[in-house]
Amino acid sequence: MNVTTDDLRKKWLEFWKKKNHIIIPSAGVLPDNDPTALFHNSGMHPLVPYLCGQTHPEGRQLANAQKCIRTGDIDEVGDATHLTFFEMLGNWSLGDYFKKEQIEWSFEFLTQELNLPLEKLAVSVFAGDDDAPRDQEAADLWKAAGIPENKIAYLGKSDNWWAKGDIGPCGTDTEMFFWTGDEAAPKSFQESHNDPRWVEIWNDVFMTFNRKADGSLEELEQKNIDTGMGLERTVAVLNGKKSVYETDAFTEILAKIAELSGDPKLAINPLAETAAANSMRVIADHIRSGSMILADKVSPSNVDQGYILRRLLRRAIRHGKKLGIEGHFTVKIAEEVKKKLGHQYTELEKNWNFIVEELEQEEEQFAKTLETGEREFNKLAGKILEFSNKKELSGKKAFWLYETYGFPFEMTEELCAEQGLTVDKSGFDEAAKKHAEASRAGSEQKFKGGLGDTSVETTNLHTATHLLHAALKKVLGDHVEQRGSNITPERLRFDFSHGEKMTPEEKTKVENLVNEAIDANVEITCEETSVDDAKSQGAIGLFGNKYGEKVKMYTMGAFSKEICGGPHAEKTGNLGKFRIKKEEASSRGVRRIKAVLD
Ligand code: SER
């Protein structure tokens, strides 16, 4: 079969359109108001509020291709399967159709749209435990559709239960597998499901519960369908390839890297287990992710998303050096990313100047520190190898390399490994903890709460965020744009574009404006309308988000009008007193405010 990533995406979207789904645009890579994650990591992630019962302006049947970033495994990238950026194809029923339709449509898509031979397909369903019984209904539906009993496996929680995190919507699922072996597929899927030649290509979640903070399950008011298919991986499987790096998603990117390295032969086998092929894959993946993150206007920095971006870019740059690429090269790779994905994700084109500037700047800054840093590192490593029994670099030194030369820990670890040294990770962590900024970097699961949290506290803080956004525009000017919002039950955190530190007077003005809006106790209303109409009414939108045909617009008296999914307080008077606790830099040209409601 010869299917490209564009083909599969198109087939997917057209199929769901035929089934009366609205195709919604991909949300940006940054989650909005979600303190539990740095990036959107699945198709359902931006839809959590709607899966929990908020109404979606486009209706109850949705589908899309969503940009996802998973950075838990940056260090694994370089092998043949891991990606830090990928597209997830998804379809959703928000309290509309359920198991029967979904399983019938899944079967139809696999066997009629993708023409997959029945004998290579298998499915797994939930075997049952204390939380939920065996999903016999799903098994029966698969059988009715045409999957034979011997190709159905009944598996436990670790296989057939899907949850976004420790808290939030979850439920049993059914997964679909494709046989990639050369010989015929084994007879019994129950017995052979662990064989790696069965590759999972699609996951249908029957979202039935909400896991609460205390660990208990409550039934969701609406039962949802949430499905996800990894685009690149499925294309690889359909083409009989072992790796995503052998798909069209990477052909031109890898060829460009080979060309720049001066050894075009490198491109011939992207799966080779050589150090050079490994470096190529690292560069290809990291510049692809980096470009997608930059396209949503994140700059490299030492905290949060900016730090992940910095790690990706710096690791790629270092591997470029290993390949012998001379001079700046990241923009040339990013160009290939734009050629490949720009038609689907137009922000690559729209924010191209920003992407180029940031890449150039990061490359220049890193090149400077890298050279000095590597010299210092080699001196250090030489000393350890010569004088020390323990072939280990201390955590303190690793942190010193980080602070002084911008060496991400993972890079120091890699440099050490090349010389046969280990690094004391816990020592590094300890040193980092002492350093206020560094201690905030890199950790992904920091807060409780999240998009499933519709407590009064987070709802009020969300409303306060709108008032703050409006007040900042009034006090500082129209250049203020939201760059990130993160809400826990205790505080709000708001990132916005602004070049300078705010003066005490400006802060007081902003506080007063928000408190005036609260004291006015105006009613908060929500309307469904088109983006154009919302904009013509003066509503502000969220930066980086692309909207579908219909949006929800929240109005708070004359103070604020904003496109947003909700939920919000009923009246501004519910909020209490607003207080800014901190105003600081977040990355270049971006300020961060932390504020509370007393
Ligand atoms: N949420 C499920 C997943 O990520 C299905 O979309 O696999």
Image (cartoon, grey):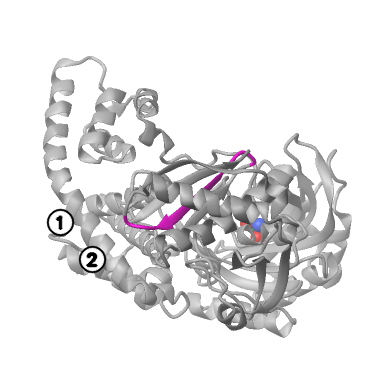
Question: Would you name the residue on which mark 2 appears?
Answer: 258
Q: Quadrant of ligand 1?
A: bottom right
Q: Nearer the viewer, residue 361 or 15?
A: 361
Q: Position of residue 508 (x, y in %)?
A: 47, 47
Q: Residue at x 17, y 55 (%)?
A: 364
Contact between marks 1 and 2 (CB within 8 A): the answer is no
Q: Quadrant of the C terminus?
A: top right
Is residue 186 something that shows in the picture? no
Q: Amino acid at mark 1?
A: Gly
Is residue 211 something that shows in the picture? yes
Instruction: Note whether 74 is above or below 373 in the view shown.
Output: below
Q: Position of residue 170 (x, y in %)?
A: 74, 50
Q: Which residues are magenta?
A: 489-499
Question: Would you name the residue on which mark 1 appears?
Answer: 324
Q: Is residue 451 magenta?
A: no
Q: Amino acid at mark 2?
A: Ala
> Along the horizontal axis of the image, is 570 left or right of 541?
right
Q: CA distance from mark 1 to mark 2?
A: 10 Å
